[in-house]
Amino acid sequence: DAEAQRRRRKGKRGRGRGRGRGASISTPLPRGTFKTITANEFQKLMQKPNTTIIDLRTEPEWEKGHIEEAIRIDYLDKAFNETIAKLPKNGTYLLYCESGYRSSEAMQFMKSVGFRKVYELQDGYAEWPF
């Protein structure tokens, strides 16, 4: 009957809005700061307490030069995800690689496993002026 059809249509409109039966369950988005920053911004953040600088490059790249305060965690290493996941999630992390690709990928991984503050150096170490 017409009344039953109207009720069915009305019921479909209300679904997925977080109320009543049939509501969709959504996964909350990770909260925090995940940003690509300039070399000047990167250098300023380096001075803040509880900040870790991570060089994601290979050992030969590291040996050609690196930011002095950095630790090296090779993005291409098989144990990269496991090593990163062991770090405290509440710190501030500054990432860089040679040109920006690996740091962008690493930042997305860190976001996915619950880190809160991750920044990557725009254009990587190749453009580091300091």
Image: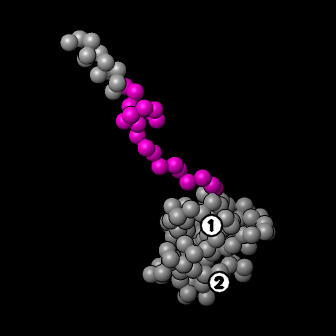
Q: Nearer the viewer, mark 2 or mark 1?
A: 1
Disc tally is 2
Any magenta on residue 32?
Answer: yes
Q: Nearer the viewer, residue 19 or 42?
A: 19
How far across and how far down the image is residue 72, in percent?
A: 61, 81
- What percent of the width, then of the height, locates residue 94? 65, 68
Residue 102, how many percent across, how many down? 51, 70
Magenta stretch bounds? 13-33
Relative side of 12 to 102, left or right: left
Residue beneath disc 1: 89
Question: Residue lying farthest top?
Answer: 2
Q: Residues within 10 Å of mark 2 (few under 14, many from 20)?
A: few
Is 100 magenta? The answer is no
Indicate the quadrant where residue 130 lies: bottom right
* Residue 98 visible to the viewer: no
Question: Which residue was labeled with disc 2?
Answer: 65
Q: Is residue 59 above or below residue 109?
A: below
Q: Considering the whole magenta stretch, tell me its main secondary structure.
A: loop
Q: Quick one: SS at disc 2?
A: loop
Query: Residue at coordinates 60% horizontally, 63% vertically from top-left?
Result: 115
Mark before the other along the chain sequence, 2 or 1: 2
Q: Amino acid at mark 1?
A: Lys
Cα–Cα gap, marks 2 and 1:
28 Å
Which residue does the image show at 53% across and 68% down from the upper left?
106
